[in-house]
Image (cartoon, helix red, strand yellow):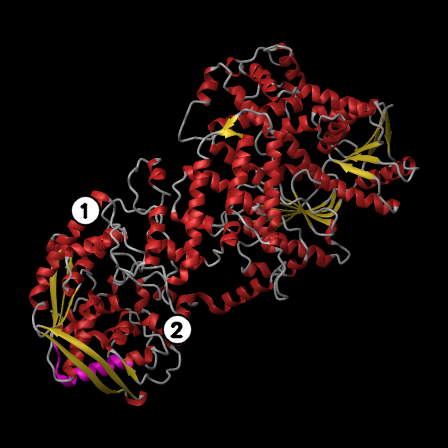
Amino acid sequence: MTVRLVRGARWATLVDHLAREISAVATDPFITLRVVVSTRATGRVLGQEVAARLGISAGISYLSPADLMRQLAQQASEERNRSRWLGTPLDLAVAEALAQVQHPLVARALAPDDTRPGRRRATAIRIARLLRGYLDHTPQLLASWTAGADTGLGGATIPDALSWQPALFRAVTDALELDPLVTLEKTYEAARADTVPTFVIAVDDLTRPQLQALRALGDGPGLTVLQPAGSAGDGWATELADAVESLPDGAAPPPIVSVHDSHGEARQVEVLRDELTRAFAEDPSLEPREVAILCPQPERYSALLDSAFAAVDDKAHPGRTLRVQPIGSLDANPVLTLLVALLRLGRSRATARQIVGLLLSPPIAHRWHLTERRAVVELIAGAGIRWGLDTEHRALFELSGVEQNTWVRGIDRLLIGLAVAPGTDVGLGLSGSEAVTASDLSVVGALVEVLARLRRIVAATASPATVPEWVTRSRDALGSLVGLPRTEQWQLLHALAVLARFESDHQGNATVLTPHEFAHLLEDAARPPRARVAAGNGTLQVIPLGELQHVEFRVLAMLGVTDDVVPGRGGVLPDSVDLGDHAPDVRARRLRQLLTHARSTEKLLIVRQASSQRTNRSTAKPVAVSWLLEQLGGSAAAFTHPPTATSEANFLSRPSFDLPALGGAESRRASGSGALTITARRRTEARSREVGPSPAQLTLTQLERFLLDPAKTFLRSAGGITLYAEPQVTDEMPLEAGGLEKWQVVNALVDSWKSGTTLESVESYFRQREDLPPQRIGDALFQAAKADAVLLWKSAWGEWSGPVARHAVDLELDLGGAGTVRVVDEVCTRSGFALVATPSRGDQNILRPWLDSLALAAQGIAAPARFHRFVKTQATRYAIAAEATQVDPPTAQDALTHLTTLAGAYAQGQHRLVTVPCGPALTYAREFIAGKFRAADWGGPVGHWKSKWAKPGEAWPLFYADDVRELLTDELLPGDPVNGQVSPFQAWAWELYAPLAKGWS
């Protein structure tokens, strides 16, 4: 038989001729035919075009060159050997053979390194890829090595640094127990014996074995090759052809080219969406299947493309209706991902966050009913779990004997918390968790069982094993932990199928893998494939470089053609011997493919980056695009796009279709430079709300909470918004005396003195809760905290231990037009003072004793407000010192008047925002009364420890941005105090805290 070459200038002409050839051959309705195409996506498109011409395309297989080799290997009964050469068995055989190679470079590459546990596997994978490359491009080199030669191509001397490769290849074939050259020869024999009529159309790039297989098909049943004239495929086909025929068709006219200069990747996608929408608007006959987006690296733009073309409501960009193929990667199998994490658990720190992630993963959470994330996190955080399964696991990290804050210890605390009342000493040196209640019994039971099984899995997967042994361990791990609903059972079945394939491929293989190496092996198998090109389903396709390269489109858009991708890096593999002209020129191939794509379309849109997305300055344009324009010849229409979708220039000469962006541009023009920020607008609206009725009654505690954080009070009362922190777990076990831990101990010690309990009970409390660092570090922290507590208590003891009196507060306050409010509470005085002692250093700690003093003064009882606290100032040489602060009581009338002012602010703050954060307000009032206020000093970032507003809390950032100056910029509104101050903050700070600032001593 012969190889016949048919040349044509255009894809449509070649398809027409192919349809005629198929019609002539398929005289029997049961006959099967084979068409070899460049990719599977090309095969789907070609199948539809053939069916459109013949009315049917049944009995025709459209195969890529790799699919053809697989089919021929199956006919030769060599499919398993081919699979083992292309799969993980070759990687493991290389890993085993490397140990037999006597070469210093190889020995250094395999030297034990605890910081790189995957070193051997990574080296084996790289060399396995190299051997596959030799077979693809120079099988004669491997044939000479099999024969015993230790030379390169043509007998050339191999450099000493690479001289280990011939012996390694022979050792690999021995370990693998197969010769890939024999597999290829049997494949060629199957091709010669094949009887299926075979056609090849528009295939440019082939490996040497694929080319030899086509030659064998030509020697057997015969082969018809249809190639675009002048293409790369025309070259190899001419070498094979026994007869050549040229179709009488003319070359396609050059495409109409437009180049769109834009900015960053996100902006490029917006420009692309606009230009595609414009193309459909200008040509109503255009259909999505006739348009393609060429993106050399789709994964780089996948999230941007998927979000830009996702269908939303009718008011969005009309480009969202273009039915663009989603290109995001498929989701990984959660069961395989979980199994990889389980295999790595033994060598990890098993942190609280890490294992909480495992517990809440769907495969485990469904089986063990751990569906409430908040409940699980609260229990884990309340149990004090940080990291480490147990003491044996901690020993891997040189912390043997330290059981505190491990998972086993935390589970014990949960069980004790279920069994006994909080605070009960059960003699175990451990207290029960206060986070657990009787309703958590089922959750705690599940945690206990899952932890026990995790520890068994870690013990079972600690030692190296062969792949079949690892498969058995993995099945046991899945069986002990995983359970899925019926609709998700495919995940478990797929995971078991992957393990079964490993077991089959490596049956009898004695190569031993560490847990880390098998986890990597499984991770590669679990990695989801990239979403295939959805050719032939009517959508607008997103194709990588080389996909559908000869298929004709009416419109082709190029996106992401950058220098790092096209031409990109060279294709020579590391450690490769000199292959001469046989080495693939990957850079030239990418450029050729780019040009082929461009010549196969009527209209070419190129979107490229020409300006910086940050500075808007010009940047270097991609060289490949400039080269392409030069190769195409002619002139290209050039367009420059503004940096953002909401720029006014985006809606002038070539108006964008982006209606939301148009709204943004109009708002920008209308607002001008004086536009308010979102926080300023929110603050203005919150301050302008209508004031509702006053509360009938309040307590001093409620008043204190309002003064401490008016924003939080406003959100809770006016919007029903309660700000609270979600429960969080932490992975850090304290190994040093931190400031927060020390403050907690000092505060507990001071409280113990107040209540009369012993210091030993406080230390035991912290020890059993495991809040202190372990062992001697915790001892040192407790002693340092005790010294500070003694310092504070010495300052406060004399007054705290004096006579105690309790006074009922019941005041009726007239708020004018807002009605009246009744203040009801109880105040306790010691030694005649409204007294507070706290290790906190903030000025806001004076508020409660000051409010108590005002309430008593309004009832005719004089009791100065006094509080003892820590200070650390230049006067104390920045060492901790105790300080006593006193505010003398006003007259009864002044006290009643000011309590009425405070209550009025409270009443107003229930309905509108009172912009008076406590910390800055106290500072301002004291500075103003002392004549030290300077507006220039009130600047800098909010939250910075040196600024006037160091601790803004959780609510205020909703109303203020990052600059303290905002406190002084608002204008007074009706309802704000009128007292000579120029801003609402200053007016409220002076109105509420002037008496406090005046009496501060």
Q: CA distance from mark 2 to mark 1?
A: 52 Å
Per the rendered image, the range of residues in magenta is: 889-904
Q: Which mark is residue 779?
A: 1
Quickly name the residue at label 2. Answer: 684
Q: Secondary structure at mark 1?
A: helix
Residue 892 painted magenta = yes
* Residue 19 spot, x, y in % from top left: 87, 40
Residue 251 lies left or right of residue 167; in this view the side is right
Identity of the residue drawn at 15% across and 77% down:
853
Q: Quadrant of residue 826?
A: bottom left
* Residue 372 spot, x, y in % from top left: 46, 59
Q: Secondary structure at mark 2?
A: helix
Mark 2 against mark 1, which lies toward the viewer? 1
Q: Where the N terminus falls, by quadrant?
A: top right
Residue 913 painted magenta = no
Instruction: In this rendered view, identify the residue nearer to me: 507 or 16.
Output: 507
The type of residue carrying mark 1 is Asp
**Disc count in the image?**
2
Among the two numbered marks 2 and 1 on one chain, the one whose residue lies closer to the N terminus:
2
Instruction: In this rendered view, identify the residue nearer to me: 618 or 520.
Output: 520
Residue 353 lies left or right of residue 945; in this view the side is right
Instruction: In this rendered view, identify the residue nearer to me: 198 or 94.
Output: 94
Q: Where the C terminus falls, by quadrant?
A: bottom left
Q: Is residue 436 above or below residue 588?
A: below
